[in-house]
Image (cartoon, grey):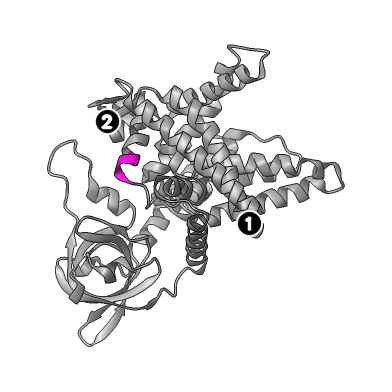
């Protein structure tokens, strides 16, 4: 049996290496870095307004070489000169530009975050600043229709929220929690959520997908009593989960969670005993088979570490204390889930961010119920726009709930010693922990 395990390891090692090699050697534009070029590219990330520029990511399509256009690929970090034209850019816009591609600089200080390596793992090898006179929009992206459709639908629902009276921080939080759109979050609000340890709530991930899964699974629980009911319920749940993933822009964190829950659904519909560790490993393997670079993304590492921590630690801690009162039992359950997730992610949080939120228990006890209610009210407000009075009631309750959530976050942030900073550890120490 040992030789079979070794053979599998060697096979998958070379499979991963081969996929990475293919990704790295597809006519990448890096041959033209540190030189002037004329090129065509598509915006693949939502533009973000900075104080003096508009930041985005370009997917290179072709570069002018002599008198010919040569197809190329790869991503570029771009900063457009701030003006009304740049602020109108959207994901999927295609531009032609002339500029000098520059290498992203290495970090100069030992132990400093290596931004160049981080961007390389995301397929971004160069950066570029474009004055208004050096670029123009020439059309729409002819690329991934699914992603473009997802972003257009998300934009439509954001406008629906605005029509229902949401604005400011309430619109920003509703967009982040239910649609995965975080560009409206102000720096002050981000800082409050980070300090209190609640920033994960604003990044649509396993928690949000789990809430949707729980709702759909129990709403259609009666279907399982009929013939082929388990399969029908599985199909309904599967469609709803991936519809939610589509609605939130198919972000990597949502894709991870939806993939993992999809494996759970398949196992349940086949009357199989689902081993959650196998589900976790299978979903990670499936995603890494498609894109091996995911393993270097902080979100990927934190997501799987949190789930692994919950799976391993939560049942053990939960069994330590039993209470016959429903509310006390639920609060204890939230505490054990929160502690399990923090134990799983603690080494990585210290390694990457050198800080730790001290009141994470209090934060999660408060924000998880708030987040659940906000997601349900947000979905209700969007689905029932054709019944004006119901949408109005749902949006009013949504606004008040978000105000309550933000007030709780600001209260926790204001507590003394809410955040420990200046903590650091090495890669070896992180692995040992």
Visible in this render: residue 260?
no
Q: Are marks 1 and 2 in contact (CB under 8 Å)?
A: no
Numbered mark located on residue 388 in the image: 1
For the image, the number of numbered tags is 2
Secondary structure type for disc 1: helix
Does 116 appear in magenta? no
Q: How many neighbours does mark 1 have within 10 angstroms: few (below 14), some (14-19), or many (20 or more)? A: few
Residue at (17% x, 49% y) in the render: 106
Residue 282, compared with residue 158, is above or below; it is above
- Report the front residue among 433 and 146: 146
- Report the front residue among 113 and 209: 209
Residue projecting furthest to the bottom:
67
Residue at (49% x, 53% y) in the render: 165
Numbered mark located on residue 354 in the image: 2
Visible in this render: residue 234?
yes
Q: Is residue 56 left or right of residue 4?
A: left
Please provide the residue range marked out in magenta. Answer: 186-190
Quadrant assignment, res 410: top left
């Amino acid at each position: 049996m040992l030789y079979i395990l070794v053979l599998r390891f060697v096979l998958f090692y070379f499979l991963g290496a081969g996929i990475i090699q293919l990704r790295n050697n597809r006519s990448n534009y890096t041959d033209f870095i540190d030189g002037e070029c004329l090129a065509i590219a598509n915006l693949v990330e939502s533009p973000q307004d900075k104080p003096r520029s508009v930041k985005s990511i370009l997917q290179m399509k072709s570069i002018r070489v002599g008198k010919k256009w040569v197809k190329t690929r790869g991503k570029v970090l771009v900063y457009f000169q701030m003006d009304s034209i740049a602020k109108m850019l959207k994901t999927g816009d295609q531009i032609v530009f002339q500029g000098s591609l520059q290498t992203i600089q290495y970090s100069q200080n030992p132990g400093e975050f290596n931004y160049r390596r981080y961007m390389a793992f995301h397929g971004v090898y160069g950066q570029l600043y474009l004055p208004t006179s050096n670029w123009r929009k020439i059309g729409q992206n002819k690329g991934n229709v699914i992603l473009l459709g997802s972003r257009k639908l998300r934009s439509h629902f954001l406008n629906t929220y605005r029509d229902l009276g949401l604005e400011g921080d309430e619109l920003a939080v509703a967009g982040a929690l239910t649609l995965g759109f975080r560009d409206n979050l102000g720096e002050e609000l981000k800082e409050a959520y980070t300090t209190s340890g609640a920033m994960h709530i604003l990044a649509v991930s396993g928690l949000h997908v789990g809430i949707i899964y729980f709702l759909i699974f129990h709403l259609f629980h009666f279907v399982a009593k009929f013939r082929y009911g388990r399969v029908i319920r599985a199909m309904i749940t599967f469609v709803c989960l991936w519809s939610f993933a589509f609605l939130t822009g198919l972000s990597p964190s949502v894709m991870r969670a939806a993939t993992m829950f999809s494996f759970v659904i398949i196992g349940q519909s086949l009357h199989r005993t689902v081993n959650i560790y196998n589900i976790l490993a299978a979903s990670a393997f499936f995603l890494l088979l498609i894109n091996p670079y995911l393993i270097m993304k902080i979100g990927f590492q934190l997501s799987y570490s949190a789930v692994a921590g919950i799976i391993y630690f939560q049942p053990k801690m939960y069994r330590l204390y039993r209470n016959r009162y429903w509310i006390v039992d639920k609060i204890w359950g939230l505490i054990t889930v929160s502690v399990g997730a923090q134990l799983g992610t603690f080494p990585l949080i210290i390694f990457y961010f050198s800080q730790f939120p001290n009141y994470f228990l209090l934060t999660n006890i408060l924000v998880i119920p708030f987040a659940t209610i906000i997601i349900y009210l947000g979905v209700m407000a969007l689905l029932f726009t054709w019944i004006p009075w119901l949408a109005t009631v749902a949006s009013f309750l949504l606004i008040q709930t978000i105000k309550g959530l933000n007030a709780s976050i600001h209260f926790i942030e204001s507590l003394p010693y809410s955040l420990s900073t200046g903590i650091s550890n090495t890669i070896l120490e992180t692995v040992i922990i």
